[in-house]
Each structure stands twice: as C-alpha cells, then as structure tokens.
Image: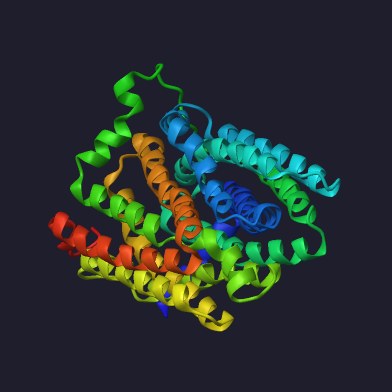
Amino acid sequence: MNDQLSSSSDVRSLLRHPPLLLFVVSRSFSEFSWQIATVAVGWQIYQLTGSAFYLGMVGLVQFIPSALLIFIAGHAADRYDRRRVVQLCQFAQALAAAYLAWRSFTGSLAAGEILIALVVFGIATAFESPALSALLPGVAPEGGLQHATALSSGAGQLATITGPAIGGLVFAIAPAAPFAIMTLFWLFAGLAAAAIRLERVVKPTEPPTFSELFAGITFVRDNPAILGTISLDLFAVLLGGASALLPIYARDILHAGPFALGVMRAAPAIGALVMTAFLARHQIKRKVGLRMFQAVIAFGLATTVFALSQTIWLSILALAAMGAADTISVVIRVSLVQLATPDEMRGRVGAVNFLFIHASNQLGEFESGITAALFGAMPAALLGGIGTIAVALLWMKLFPSLRKVERLE
C-alpha cells in the first residue's frame, strides 16, 4: 500500500513538472503523426501502384538517410541544444506532410512524391530520435528519471495504439485528411519543444574528432552483451517484421478496408501496452538474458501464425502477441543500454541503437516487400517468422554471455 501511495505521489509530481510535460506532449504529437503515416502512406502507395515492391521501398528510402546521417545526428545531440534539434526536425516533417496533403487534395499525388517525402522524414527522424532520447534526463525531475521514462513510454504506446486507427478512419473519409492531421500534429510538437525550459542544458564541446563521432560504435562493440542484444533485434525484426505486408493482407487476403488496416497496425501496440502494464507489476528479476531470447522466439511464432491466418480476428490476436513479445525484448535491451551508458555519450550510443532499431524496422519492410513480390505475401511472412526463430537460436550460441545474464543491475 505504501508503495502504491508513493507511486501516486510520484505521478502527481511529474504532472506538475512543466519541462517533462512539454517533452511528453512534443514526443506524443510527433509519434501520432508517424503512426498516422504508417497507414496513410502504406495504403496510398499500394492504391497507386498495387505493388509489393513499392511497399518495400517505403522502408528503404527512410533507412538510407538514417544510415548515412545517424552518427552525425548522435554527435549533434551531444553538442547542440537538444530542444532546438527536435524542434527543427518536427517543423521539417510538418512541411513535408503539408506538401503531401496539398498534392493529395488536388488528386495529383504520385508514388514518387511520397517516396521523396519519406526521405525527408528519414533525415528528420535521424536527428530527432537521438536528441529526444538524450533530452529526457534533462527534463525529468531530480531522481525521477525512471518514472519519467515510464510516463513518456506510456504516452508513446497510446499514440501507437490510436494513431493507426485514426489514420485509417480519416483516410476512408478523404485521402488528404491524414496528411493534413500529420501537418498540424508536427507543428504542435515543434511548438511544445520550443517551449521547454531546461534546468540542465547541454554545453557545446570542441568540434568533434573522427574518433569521437563514432565513439558510440566503439562503446557498443566493446560491450558483448549490448552488441548481442541490439544485433539480435536487428536480425530478428529484419526477418520477422511483416508490417510492410499489412496493406496486402488487409485488402487481398482478409478482404478488409483502411479502417481494418488501422486496427491491425494498432494491434501490436495494444499487446505491447498490456505487457508493459504486466511488467510494471511483475518485473523480470532472474534469467533476463534467457527471457529475452524466449521473447524473440515467441515473436517468431506469432509472426508465423499471422502469416497463415485467414481471418481478421486471428490476425489481430497474432499481431498483439507480436507486440507483447517484442516489449519484453525492448525492456531488457533498453535497460542494459541505459545502465551501461555514461550521460555524456547518450546521444552517440542512442544513435547506434536508433540505427539498429530502424534498420530492423525499415530494412525489414524492404525485405518483406521484395520477398512478397517474388514469392507472395503469405510465403514472405512465413519465411520471416521461421527466420526469426532461427536467428534467436543462433544468437544463443554466438553470445553465451548474453544468454547467461541473470539480473538487470
């Protein structure tokens, strides 16, 4: 009971801390825009082209600028005012979304223009994500980082759950509507970031040397447990990520519409939110390394069920199970990285982590799209699920120290 009272007091304290609230508002509006985009862009691309290859290109054109710029972005987060970095990125994304809204409203939007806008989104996200990650400790109250992280994560999950459903619903009303909402949300996000007042600001350092620019890679390479953890996420999701195929499943296999696609997009986040609530009350206290591998195997099994499903309800359940399993892996991975990273390197290490995460998501979309174009959507998703299980089993052999991690300390 005392613990519950303390938790309630901590939450009320957070809600009275303006820098953190503005940070959560900025991140939430930005995440809402991204989640709306996942439905609007995917459905629009498939509607314009009818091509699984183009769906795969959605991930690739976002990944390439991220891969090229992420280490510069990580150092920028450690060198410059993180609030301004976030704000500029969100305004740039608002401009790109406004262009898509205008072209869609006039009925002249082409698939190539969507891909160009996605390049802009990829560049902006490459700088925004490490800056947001490194900014959180500066906006949290003293001693309240853990609760602040939970609040920020919960707000992100809410956006991930409701954003796709909103995107699917408004797209059914008018194809330009999702892009217009994305524009407004990114503008609101940028204004919230501009209003943040920090008690602890980043002090500019000397111009970076080559070694400092890539210090995050060195740090990850020299920590086998961290290297094994984030590389497992890279290859497992690279093979098992079936999100690029959801428009095909929604329209051609399950014979549903854009709103159903939005619900399917939201299903993994619903599973993730349920698992987050469970883990908040029942922490993983022992055999955390083994539990992470088991979660990845469960993710692969759920992907296999989704691949073979012919009914909408089973597909949604499988997607929710994928989100729940992925949450366990994420909790362990993020905890390992946070516990081992000094404050002055958070931006650069966060950049490496961002690169691995987005490589797995966006290149996974590309891989799924290419495989579906060659073999069909169902075989592509099935191969992805089986591949994820195989990667988890292989990594257990390659990183025995990671498998044997007992506690998050």
Q: Is residue 139 above or below residue 149?
A: above
**Quadrant for the C terminus in the image:** bottom left
For the point 41% across and 37% down, the residue is: 347
For the point 61% across and 64% down, the residue is: 247
Q: Is residue 212 visible?
A: yes
Q: Quadrant of residue 263?
A: bottom right
Q: Nearer the viewer, residue 19 or 239?
A: 239
For the point 75% across and 48% down, the residue is: 184
The percent coordinates of residue 313 (x first, y second) are: 56, 83
View extreme (front): residue: 374
Left or right for 294, reference 304 = left
For the point 49% across and 49% down, the residue is: 140
The percent coordinates of residue 68 (x first, y second) are: 45, 31
Left or right for 96, reference 85 = right
View extreme (right): residue: 106
The percent coordinates of residue 396 (x first, y second) are: 18, 61
Left or right for 293, reference 25 = left
Label total for image: 0
Q: Nearer the viewer, residue 251 or 64?
A: 251
The percent coordinates of residue 270 (x first, y second) are: 53, 72
Q: Nearer the viewer, residue 341 or 199?
A: 341
Q: Is residue 200 visible?
A: no
